Amino acid sequence: MDWSLVLISQGIESALENTPEQGWGLAVSAEDYQRALEAIRLYRVENRGWPWQRQIFRAGVIFDWASLAWVVLVLLFFWLDEHLGLQRAGLMNSRAVGQGEWWRLFTAIWLHADASHLAFNATLGFLLLGLAMAGFGSGPGLLGAYLAGMGGNLLGWFVSPMRGSSLGASGMVMGALGLLAMQSLTRWRGIPGRTKYLLAGVSGGLMLFVLLGLSPGTDVIAHLGGFISGSLIGLLLVRFPLDRSTTGNVLCGLLFVTLVLLPWWLALRHG
């Protein structure tokens, strides 16, 4: 069947046949016979040493439903913003950050312009965070993506210290994507031909970033900063994995909560 796809890609018609004497085979016309043999030969040479059918994933959790708690928190902040008007105090404003209001790097992650903006980030974030938290642990995955979101805002301030306001969790969502791209480094240890799988995992993350993070009209700088920050944090977590026990998750969770409450306390106090 693989060979038949190869022949189709070269414009060579073929038919799968099964005979009692010879078993399964491909039937091609006499004039295409030599060309078909050459196409199959080149395909086999190109894919030599790449085992397509192989068990590559470790057993374990593949999705962490605790990411739903993050969605609930995002919805809560949207509701609070609608009723209390949090944007003035929490928007990402490069000029204000330059004047010492560093907490805006964090608070802006929880604010959204409208329901459609919220829905996109909440939906995509739920999926990517769930995968990242399953790979690195609930606490480390959530904290890593959150710090990556801050990194996206930090890059925006660094690149354009006089630019206007911005808001949204998309930098954090792209950070989760960066974590996932680096997670492939932990999956392929001991697997023959792992270099190809590693390149495929990282390339897949990059392509998803281009598809999701470079949309016109979005904060591309924050997206890029989030993805880069998430990738760097993912590399650190691969090289120096954090404790995934209950204690490790609780400690990371407490730090995450602190980095949510403290910036907002400062924002509302100075706002």
Image: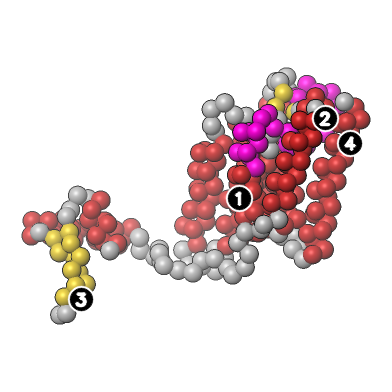
Residue farthest to the left?
Answer: 30
Q: Are marks 3 and 4 in contact (CB under 8 Å)?
A: no
Q: CA distance from mark 3 to mark 1?
A: 45 Å
Q: Which amino acid does the dot numbered 3 rest on?
A: Gly
What residue does disc 1 label?
Answer: 127
Q: Which residues are magenta?
A: 93-122
Q: In the displayed image of the protein, which residue is found farthest to the right? A: 269
Q: Which residue is mark 2?
A: 84
**Label 2 amino acid?**
Leu
Q: Does dot 4 land on a helix, a strand or a loop?
A: helix
Q: Amino acid at mark 4?
A: Trp
Name the quarter where the N terminus is drawn: bottom left
What is the quadrant of the C terminus in the image?
A: top right
Dot 3: within a 10 Å radius of its alpha carbon, few (fewer than 14), some, or many (20 or more) residues? Answer: few
**Tag in front: 3 or 4:** 4
Amino acid type at mark 1: Leu
- Sequence order check, earlier mark of 3 and 4: 3
> Pointer 4: what residue?
265
The residue beneath circle 3 is 23
